[in-house]
Image (spheres, coloured by chain):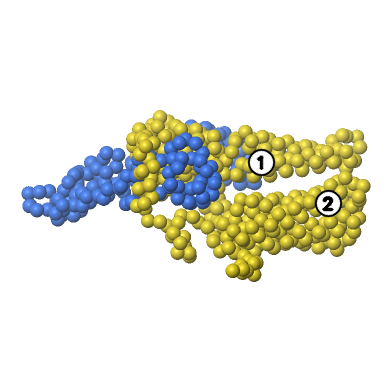
Amino acid sequence: MAEREYRRLPGRGRAKTGVGALVSTSSRLFLARDHLLRVYSMGWIQNYKRFYFSDIQALAVCKTKRATVWNIILGVLWFACVAAFAYGWSEPLLKPVRRDSNFNPGTWFLGGALLFFLVLLVINLLRGPSCRTQIQTPVSTEELPSLNRLGTALKVLDQLRPLIEQAQGAITPDELPAKVAEMVRNTPPRIIPGTGMPGSLRRELNYRGAMHQWLFMLLLATGLLTGLSIFHNYIALILVTTACVAAAAIFAIVSLVKQHQSLAGKALRGVTWGAMAFICIYGLIGYVNMIIVVIQHPKIANDQWQMLKLMTESYSMQSPWHVGTRAFMLAASSGLGISGLLLLRSFRRSTGFLRPRDNPPHDH
Amino acid sequence: MASRIVNCVKCQATLLGEGFNSGLLQPCPACGTPIRVDVFPALFRQIERGSGPETLLTSEEAGCYYHPQKRAAVTCESCGRFLCALCDVELNGQHLCPNCLDSGRKKGKLKNLENERTLYDNLALSLAVLPMIIWPFTLITAPAAIFISLRFWNAPTSLVPRTKIRFVVAILFAGAQLCGWCAGIYAIFSRR
């Protein structure tokens, strides 16, 4: 009977399948007497794949940064809700709807959003770091999406290992290095397509960082314009700054894609991600400023030009919010721009991508 | 067939065995990502080629049903036909011919080959719950949900353990919707 044949293993994940990876499929793992069953559930269809213990060649678990990224996103969203709630509480903006009532829809909405993001953040923190798990057989290497948290994946691997060794036998630590060396020697190397070079690395070897260069130059320009706007607050300056950030956003996305399989180092990749985060925060700050202006002047909500004028005029050196946000934008954009350009130069130098005129001639 | 090497999950670099079976997360030599790899003897096992059929030498020997010129090696445990080494398919210790294998898979008799099932309980529950968003459709979907629940109550649902709670919930929801429709129609006619 099915109830005695399969035992559910911990972990639950989603595998993206379907047209354009738009359809999400739930994945679970079950343990049978002589095999592992991977179940994909999509609506009212279930797909099964069996991995017999006698056929399993390897299990690999690789730590990823997905959980950290979600922690950051949820943390920023929660903090934004807290900031908006605190600002609305201190300023008479969240007014009761009726005079004879204390009901305030804005407070309830922000309070609810604040609690929602906090719960998600806590759950993500409790679930621990994320990972990817793969199972290798003689004919294929398959993902196990349900083992997407490191703690769960390691626990399941510790459960599976003795069962697989019972079916196949164990490899002693002494014989393992020799067997692996012989296997690597006997296996023909994969050739990277388009390069003719042997190796298993999937790397885009000819990317020289052009997109990164534009990104960091635009960030530097944003920093300069923001510095100017602290002392000279003109609408034209705000518009040009916003245009620079919008262009930087496009180059940031392209750079992130280009660097994914390039030879760029960790520092350069980190700064590029930092640039993307800064652009998102810049957008969020602008959105908050717009909300504040709309709340203070509800009649101009549909007039974009008036809204922009009021946003510019509302800037004040006495307001800690305005000074703080401008100082942050100046420091972050300049810092990211300068560090990014320096790291890019180092990347080009280390990979030999610098132009001949950048290399000083040697005196013999 | 040669063995397959183990690659890093993230960067696909070849892993050379350092840290295999240690139970610890070791950095990948190419991308530095922490990775744990457990390998087993199957990784180093060379897959043997299957033996080919032998030619029938004398008329006294039994020939294969599908290849009369080849000597029969086994009989199909489902239909009893004689099979040569090429036609013999071994599955869970049983020797089957290709026809019985195919028909067994299609009729669901060979559970080990089954790789897809329809979950009628999920279908019934979806029909009972989702149309409530646009409630006029429940006039059609509620009876459909009850029909599917009763029709497929005893049908095999999932390979893995599963209760019939979804059928029960679907019947309850659909029943409540039908009661609501009956009450509404009665109220309309009674006012006239």
Mark 1, secondary structure of its residue: helix
Q: Nearer the viewer, mark 2 or mark 1?
A: 2
Q: Colour of chain B?
A: blue
Q: Residues within 10 Å of mark 2 (few under 14, many from 20)?
A: some
Q: Locate residue B103, reporting x and y percent.
A: 31, 47
- Image position of A236 with respect to A86: above or below: below
Residue marked by disc 1: A71
The chain carrying label 1 is A
Name the kind of residue labelled 2 in the image.
Arg
Q: Residue furthest top?
A: A4
Residue marked by disc 2: A326
Which residue is at 30% across, 39% downward? B92
Which residue is at 68% across, 62% downward? A213
Describe residue B187's horizontal placement relative to residue A199 as left or right: right
Q: Locate residue B82, reporting x and y percent.
A: 18, 47
Which residue is at 39% across, 42% downward? A177
Mark 2, secondary structure of its residue: helix
Name the kind of residue labelled 1 in the image.
Asn
